[in-house]
Amino acid sequence: MMEPAAPGDPAPRAFLRVGGASIARHQLALVLAAGCERVICLARGLGPELIELQHEAERARASFHVIAGARGLSGLISAADEVLVVAEGLLPTTGEALRLIDGPPAILVQPSETGIPAGFERIDLNHADAGLILIPGRLVDRLMDLPPDVEPGSALLRIALQAGVAQRSVPEDIRSAGRWLLVRSEAEAHAAEDGWMERHTAAAARSPGPWLVRLLVRKFGPALLHGQGSILIIAGIAVTLVAMGIAVTWFGLGATGLVLAGLGWLMGRSWAMLGQLRREALAQSGGPAWHGPAADFAFDAGIVAMLTMLLPQFPGQPLLERAFAPVMLVGLVRILSRGFSQNWSAWADDRLVLLVVLACLFLGQVGWPGVPALAALILLAALILPRGTDQPGLTRA
């Protein structure tokens, strides 16, 4: 964490932000996912950013050390250790990096004609390094034979080459797709972030709701991820819209209430996707597994309540009988979204489409026959549509 992000800017390039987190935080996620028990940072001092990294490492039960020079490594690494060296500013995709370093010690390399212009260090006439090496700990002691002001990463690369550590190429499809970058400036960080957002939201949208969610996340996600509390604000907006929908439905504005609830679902799914992006990028756990299903169940219960309020109540009709058609409709939609082929499941899981259709029925004043008729149509679809087990999800990249 020594190289400045721009001329005259003392801030290290390691603290440039991509996807709402610094590059150093992305690298910490990588080394923790690789099973590293000790994290050593080369830096001029212990600032707030490094303290935050230290807390994250310690929460993962890894020790954290900051050193000012190469010779500080010798007392922290034993000959029995394996050392994973990550270049400053390197932003690889975690899963692909882990696969490439899985196995014996290796130096990750790439062709020099593409690596040198991208900022990587030349190894020989045909190869440049790829910013990531895994070496035996015994090689670290050779740093003591070098001048104290030597750059540790470059020095360890040369030591590993002299020791005959095997070279392993980073596949061309990974490099050409922007999934292995050396970020050196604010402009490069913005470009990397655009590609990062695109890759993580690249799953094909099979219905309008998810398509709009991905559009919103790509458009506003980077700014929201950079804000400390912005994601929680999105969740608050989602809850407020659903509550407003239920409230206006109580006063008889059924179509308006259903549309507001649909917008609330849209915001809620955007919030969930942003949270998933952050967790995947930083290798964080997703919290209790019941949170997502509980939120979906609560939302569907809100739809049932709204439809029950909107359907006419006949003389002597109990509340449970009045709620029968809404419960059947929502229950059948939930079954259809879980037991059938991916294309049909995506449409059945799209609450925005369901609520817009319901809003049109009540706007046309055909809500009473429309809700049970829609439930009957979904039941018929459940009987004739092909079944499948594949389910939609985010593309991991």
Image (tube, rainbow, N blue to C red):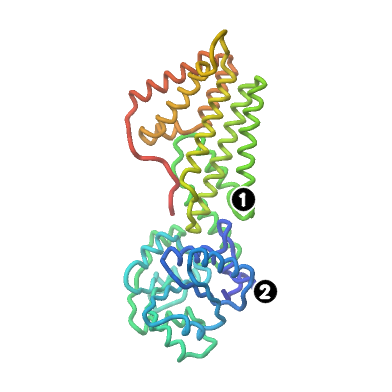
Q: Residues within 10 Å of mark 1 (few under 14, many from 20)?
A: many
Up the image or down, 324 lies above or below 100; here it is above
Q: Where is residue 300 in the image (x, y as percent from the top left)?
A: 51, 31
- Disc 1 marks which residue? 224
Residue 108 lies in quadrant: bottom left
Is 200 on the left or on the right of 252, as rendered?
Answer: left
Q: Is residue 106 above or below residue 279?
A: below
> Which structural element holds mark 2?
loop
Q: Residue 127 carries which label?
A: none
In the image, residue 364 above or below residue 179: above
> Which residue occupies 46% across, 76% down?
121
187 over 162 or under it: above or below? above
Question: Quick one: 86 or 234, which is closer to the camera?
Answer: 234
Query: Amino acid under label 2?
Result: Gly
Of 317 and 80, which appears nearest the observer? 317
Residue carrying label 2: 8
Secondary structure of residue under mark 1: helix
Q: The residue under label 1 is which amino acid type?
A: Leu
- Residue at (36%, 84%) from the top-left corner? 162
Does residue 148 appear left or right of residue 97 in this picture?
A: right
* Residue furthest to the top: 315
Which is more N-terminal, label 1 or label 2?
A: 2
In percent of width and height, residue 223 lies at 62, 52
